[in-house]
Amino acid sequence: MLYDKIKTIYPQLTIADFAPATGTIMLQNDSDGKGDYIAKWEHPTFPRPTDEELA
Amino acid sequence: MSIVLVGSTSGSVTLQEPAVAGTTVLTLPAVSGTVITTGSSGGVSQAMLATGVAGTGPAFLAYQTTVQSVANATVVKINFDTEVFDTNNNFDTSNGRFTPTVAGYYQINLTISLQMVGNSLGMLFKNGAHYLGAVTTGIAGISNSLGTQSCVVSMNGSTDYLEGYVYQGTGGAVNSNNDSKFMQFSGSLIRSA
């Protein structure tokens, strides 16, 4: 799962960081067979993981 | 006896009395306009309906029959794979999307239930963006969260579409309560544009 991969890269992140509306990160899955993806990444300190890091 | 109005260039209009006994009075309105008949190709539009007359705008009700896994900390689109009714064929069960072809204001209802302890979040998306969110509340002693959100949404009748999403943060994936009573998406036109 994408969430687990991101947590491995940034263990400091909490579930609050991923909360819709209030969090700075939003993971999304449109149930179209393409899987989870990062819909929003606005974290103030951690940069968005690269595709290589998430592979 | 019939009355025939001959057109100034071609054609004619015939007023024919009914083939029944008695007297029938036909009163025309004291305003200019077109008289709608059963033979009118366009029919009576929504705009011509009087106050208090229900229209025949789109209405749909869909629910989920196949259980769906909802990943942790991820906003997941809900599959609504079965229709109870879809009067204007505006709901697509292949992608869970409602795209009404009549412009106006729609009453929308989204009921979500997950097999989990605690709260989750049901989310209505319009055109791919979060439009409305509401907590689906966990019930003490029952491993289910359940909640309904309702709102009125303006739709343009061409490109606007609605979808249902859900979010949960239990730490692992959870399943939906795939049932017509617990996973339901419905809506109807309540006012024309």
Image (cartoon, rainbow, N blue to C red):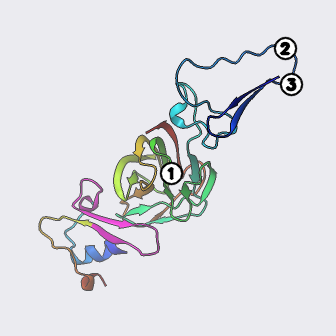
Tell me the kind of residue under disc 3.
Ala
Query: Which amino acid type is shown beneath numbered disc 2?
Result: Gly
Q: Which mark is residue B101?
A: 1
Amino acid under disc 1: Thr
Q: Determine whether the residue tagged by mark 2 lies in a helix, strand or loop.
A: loop
Chain ID at mark 2 = B
Residue A47 or residue B102, whichever sits in front: B102
* Residue B69 at x, y percent in the picture: 49, 66
Q: On the image, numbered disc 3 is attached to which residue?
A: B19
Determine the CA span between mark 1 and mark 3: 41 Å
Residue drawn at x 84%, y 14% as measured from the top left: B22
- The residue under label 2 is B22
Asked if marks 1 and 2 touch (Cβ < 8 Å), the reply is no
Q: Which mark is residue B73?
A: none
Q: Is residue A34 magenta?
A: yes
**Image quadrant of residue B129?**
bottom left
Secondary structure type for disc 3:
loop
Q: Residue at x 33, y 72 (%)?
A: A37
Which numbered mark, 1 or 2, is in the foreground of this view?
2
Asked if the residue under mark 2 is in contact with the one under mark 3, i.e. CB atoms within 8 Å, the reply is: no
Looking at the image, is mark 1 or mark 3 earlier in the sequence? 3
Q: Nearer the viewer, residue B54 or B33?
A: B33
Count of labels in the image: 3
Residue found at the far front of this picture: B9
Query: Magenta segment, which residues?
Result: A16-39
Identify whether B15 is placed above or below B175: above
Looking at the rendering, in which quadrant would you find the N terminus of chain B? top right
Q: The residue marked by circle 1 belongs to what chain?
A: B
